[in-house]
Image: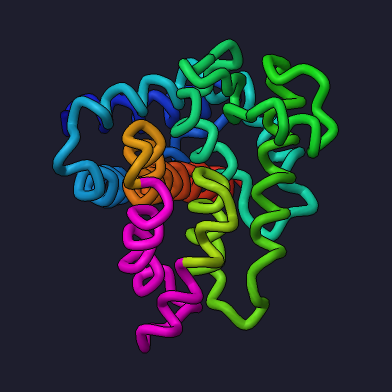
Amino acid sequence: MKKSLKHSLFSFIALLAVVGLEAPVLASYSQQNINIFTEEIESLWENDPVGLSIFLERTKNRLPNFEQSFKQSSVNLDVHWTLIAAISYQESHWNPKAISDTGVRGMMMLTQKTAKEMGIKKRTNAEQSILGGANYFQKNLSRLPEEMPKLDRMWMALAGYNLGFVNINLARELTSESGGNANLWSDVSLYLPIVLIERYAKEENEFEKNLQAIEYVERVQLYYQTLSILNREKEMLLLAVN
């Protein structure tokens, strides 16, 4: 796996060489830099090396087709485009034709209701889906208190994206009533399962779907962190050029 990841990073360097980087500039980007990025990513994916291999392959073969749409969708958002891309990977693996057995579809797996709410006419249109999903995430983000730490706002908005914002509000209320901090995702995530059990335990399918919300947040966090590292590596190379 380490060989595969290093090959991916070296491929990017080779690409920059093709478009005009001089040898001294490339030499300044040392093997040590590559090792740091490699080790950082591998540590995140320690328990899922197969998933890492697939993810890296899709960052090379699929992500470039939609990267500009992710960037455009996040222009007026409070988050970096890599988070929207991470949500999309969790939802569809960057497949604009993806569809679930419950009828959600597209890059951001929007329901018909959410698509209509966000003004999206065609859920399988990649640009529309990405824009709709990004705006829906931002809507959830804006529902949370501004004094909440930014990362905690992101994770709670993300959980709301997956299972509906009413459950987040109920979990925050229960957290506060139980002596926890309703502004910290680490606290709220402990009480969220209790809310889900109370609301959905009698509906087995619905219960299982909603109980996966915490795992959903953890997976998006993983993709987001990985994309952030890869993006940072890319930016460092570009800085070396200028």
Q: Is 45 in front, or is 149?
A: 149
Name the image quarter holding the N terminus.
top left
Q: Residue furthest front?
A: 202
Left or right placement of residue 72 versus residue 84 in this view: right
Q: Is residue 153 above or below residue 93?
A: below
Residue at 35%, 70% in the rendered image: 186
Magenta stretch prevailing secondary structure: helix
Q: Is residue 183 magenta?
A: yes
Q: Is 32 in front, or is 131?
A: 131
Q: Is 6 in front, or is 215?
A: 215
Residue at 28%, 45% in the rendered image: 41
Q: Is residue 19 above or below residue 176?
A: above
Residue 136 rendering spot, x and y as whole percentages: 70, 45
Task: Magenta stretch: give its range.
Answer: 171-200
Residue at 33%, 62% in the rendered image: 194
Residue 155 rendering spot, x and y as whole percentages: 48, 59
Q: Residue furthest top?
A: 97
Residue 216 rendering spot, x and y as whole percentages: 39, 44
Residue at 49%, 24% in the rendered image: 92
Q: Is residue 99 above or below residue 89?
A: above
Q: Quadrant of residue 133?
A: top right
- Residue 200 visible? The answer is yes
